[in-house]
Image (spheres, rainbow, N blue to C red):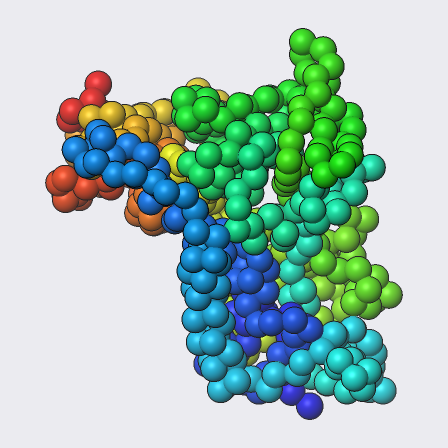
Amino acid sequence: MHDIVVLGGGPGGYAVAFRAAARGLDVALVEADELGGTCLHRGCIPSKSVLHVAEVLEEVNRADVLGLKLTFDGLDGDGLSAFRDGVINGLHKGLEQLAMSRATVHRGRGRLTTADDGRVAVDVTDDDGMVTRVEGQNVVIATGSIARSLPGVEIDGEVVQSSDQALWFTTPPRRAVIIGAGAIGMEFASMWRPMGSEVTVVEALDRVLPLEDADASRAVAKAYRRRGIDVLTSARVQAVGVDAGAGTVDLEVDAGPRTLEADLILVAVGRGPNTAGIGAQELGVLDDRGFVQTDGYGATAVSGLWAVGDVRPTLALAHAAFAEGQVVADRIAGIEDVQPVDHTHTPRVTYCHPEVASVGLTEAQARERYGDAVAVSTASMKGNAKGIIAGSDGFVKVISLAGDTPVGAIGDGGAVLGVHIVGPHATDIIGEATLATAWEAIPAELAAITHAHPTLYEAMGEAFQSAAGLPFHGH
């Protein structure tokens, strides 16, 4: 009998296990595949490894601007695989060691069941078909997500692929059509284009990165077109076909029907909860979309049963799962004053080129909530020295409540509601903004903080200065 049994060893699951172990609880961790889940083995880590290669190639492609005479002899597929796999394997080895030292790890496919005493338990079936029942005072569902497809579109793993297959190329596709302009689709476009692929991104909605601020969407779409990536928005997929190793995508766009030809079609229309066949439906904790229904702390209506990560209808991000897992573990450990995760203050990051990062409310969300009390300030990266050196422009956009007192002194103005960044290393410099929104900081307070020069993040300081009514280099 363990204190906690965690079903799933991805970011959310091992976050529960590690925090619970740090609180002195006895933990069992059940995993059918490899610890680390989609993030480590099929998502975040391999994709960012290959994106780094693409970023280096971007620099090679503009070597003449830097005063360098370089030639690119082509992609070494075996070398790319070795680099990508080396990053994964190194992180996986470290994670395995941590898990084995902090939890009892059960290898096999787990299924929720009810023990003789009425508690929820997990039956674990190993590769030999042997079933072991693992019982705990609490059980946490952390089975992650699976790639979605479109109705009538079959992912064959060859011509038509999901992100689960597309990451493992050794030769980039000559012509790629990417269906879906969310983070996954936009990252693959950034990955393949520097390697010489002809890339078309197709999005059913009216803009790319539709969950981001509209200004960020426009900036990225403009940058992609400048890079030679075709971007089709308000484009509805009618059919996907495969014939003799080649694919076609039939679209309905504003101008009428259109057909795209491709060597590889990536279906990147998001991911859904991986809850089928784990016994959750029988316990009555799933909604009609397959998500586990919980309160803000991750507790289900079934006593002792919890859920974290992508199985909940919250942000499908590894760091969101980390945060949720730690809250659940603390709650189970009886820690007082545990607060639910407020995902308004969870940073959203897209590793395309240029990078996009945001936290808090978009301008549209802020205006819907606060109307004319919203103030918007923007600092351009075009005048940022490090941005110019990196060969990329962009901006930092600050959304705040308009102050009803004169600006220029600490405490003047209203709280920062959201920050949106487009530009080099946006995913790194968003950190300061998460503190600004989470702590309800005032632009003038943030503007008073000295930002190093020359850096990319000094654009953040300039945006806060502008929001405080004290613009420096900008208007």
Where residue 453 sits, quadrant-wise, is top left
Question: Where is 448 relative to 366, above or below?
Answer: below
Question: Where is 16 relative to 405, above or below?
Answer: below
Of residue 256 and residue 272, the one placed in the foreground of this image is 256
Of residue 243 and residue 265, the one placed in the foreground of this image is 243
Of residue 409 and residue 473, the one placed in the foreground of this image is 473
Question: Where is 373 relative to 390, above or below?
Answer: above
Residue that lies at the very extreme toward the bottom in this rendered image: 1
Residue that lies at the very extreme toward the front in this rendered image: 73
User: In the image, what residue occupies the spot 54% across and 59% down?
Assistant: 39
Where residue 28 sits, quadrant-wise, is bottom right
- Residue 337 showing in the rendered view: no
Quarter of the image where the N terminus is located: bottom right
Quarter of the image where the C terminus is located: top left
Residue 351 location (% of width, % of height) = 44, 43
Query: In screen coordinates, is 279 left or right of 329?
Result: right
Residue 156 location (% of width, % of height) = 75, 47
User: In the image, what residue occupies the spot 57% across and 28% down?
Assistant: 200
Where residue 394 sits, quadrant-wise, is top left
- Residue 268 showing in the rendered view: yes
Query: In screen coordinates, is 425 left or right of 148?
Result: left
Query: In screen coordinates, is 309 left or right of 244?
Result: left
Question: Where is 71 relative to 164, above or below?
Answer: above
User: In the image, what residue occupies the spot 85% across and 87% down?
Assistant: 116
- Count every numbered label the image shows and give the total: 0
User: In the image, what residue occupies the spot 55% across and 50% down?
Assistant: 169
Residue 294 location (% of width, % of height) = 69, 59
Residue 101 location (% of width, % of height) = 49, 86
